[in-house]
Every structure is written in structure tokens, then in C-alpha cells.
Amino acid sequence: MKIGEVCLLTSDVTRLSDFYKTLLHVDNGSDDDVHQFILAEETTLTVYNDGAERGVSPQNICLAFTVDDVDAEFERLKALGVTIVSPPTIRPWGAKNMSFLDPDGNLVTFRCFPKQ
């Protein structure tokens, strides 16, 4: 069994989709205001408005993405005005992680695995 999709529920699909397209360097032409595919490879990342009104509040979800250079991404996200939760830090298991919030308050982590 594989995870087929991770879907973020939101009241503002365009705003949240634009954030993730910028974050993930995606330009896929998707511009629907109800449902957008952001990534559509083996596991899909989508943003969807199911009609429920949602405010901006912490969610019980954390998305983690593996990147080549957490420090470079940290500088890029600061320049974009993204809310940083924790700066790049080497974790006990060897990963270098940083965490930040998306526009709906969901926790997102970028991580890399520095060479020894």
C-alpha cells in the first residue's frame, strides 16, 4: 500500500496553492479556486475547499519535504516573509531541519541530510 494523496483543506484554495507553488518551485498552470493539484507524481499534494468555512489556526498536520540545502531555503523563505518556527538545526538523528508555517498555520518542515 502507498500513500496516494495528501490534501490540505482550506477556505482559500488560490492563496494556499500559490504559496505551495512558490515554495516548491511548481508552475503547473493549475488555477482553479476549488481544487488544485500541486504535485502529481507518485504521491499527490492537493489543496481543496470542501465548502466548510475554516479560519487560520494550527492544524494537526506537518508536511516534511527533503531539500538539497536547508540553509539556502531558510534564506529564501525569510525573504518571502514566511513565518519561521525554528531555524536550521541539526537533529540528533543527523538530519538538518527547519520549520515554518504556511498561510493557514500548518507546520511545514524542510530537511536535508548533510554529508558527514
Image (cartoon, rainbow, N blue to C red):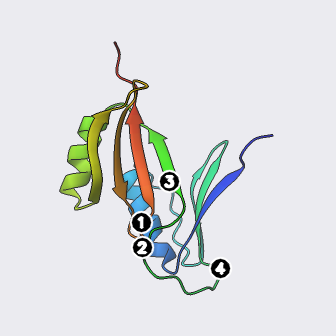
Q: Position of residue 50 (x, y in %)?
A: 65, 79
Q: Is residue 83 left or right of residue 22?
A: left
**For the residues bearing labels 2 and 4, Cβ distance under 8 angstroms:** no
Nearest to the eye among marks 4 and 3: give it: 3
User: Horizontal and vertical percent for residue 98?
Assistant: 33, 43
Disc 2 secondary structure class: helix
Labels 4 and 3: the sequence-earlier one:
4
> CA gap, disc 1 to disc 3?
18 Å
Q: Earlier in the sequence, mark 3 or mark 2?
A: 2
Look at the picture and state if 114 lies above or below 84.
above
**Residue 50 numbered tag:** 4
Q: CA distance from mark 1 to mark 2?
A: 5 Å
The disc placed on residue 62 is 3
Tell me residue 74's x, y (percent).
25, 45
Instruction: Name the kind of residue labelled 3 in the image.
Output: Cys
Look at the numbered disc 1 and give the secondary structure of its residue: helix
Q: Nearer the viewer, residue 100 or 47?
A: 100
Q: Which residue is mark 2?
A: 15
Mark 2 or 4, which is nearer the eye?
A: 4
> In the image, what residue type sits under mark 1?
Asp
Contact, CB < 8 Å: mark 1 with mark 2? yes
**Side of 13 where 75 appears, left or right:** left
The correct choice, above or below, for 24 with respect to 37 in the image is above
Of circles 1 and 3, which is in front? 3
Q: Secondary structure at mark 4?
A: loop
- Residue under the point 67% across and 42% down: 42
Amino acid identity at mark 2: Arg
State the CA–CA distance, disc 2 to disc 4: 15 Å
Residue located at (75% from left, 41% from top): 2
Rendered image: mark on residue 18: 1
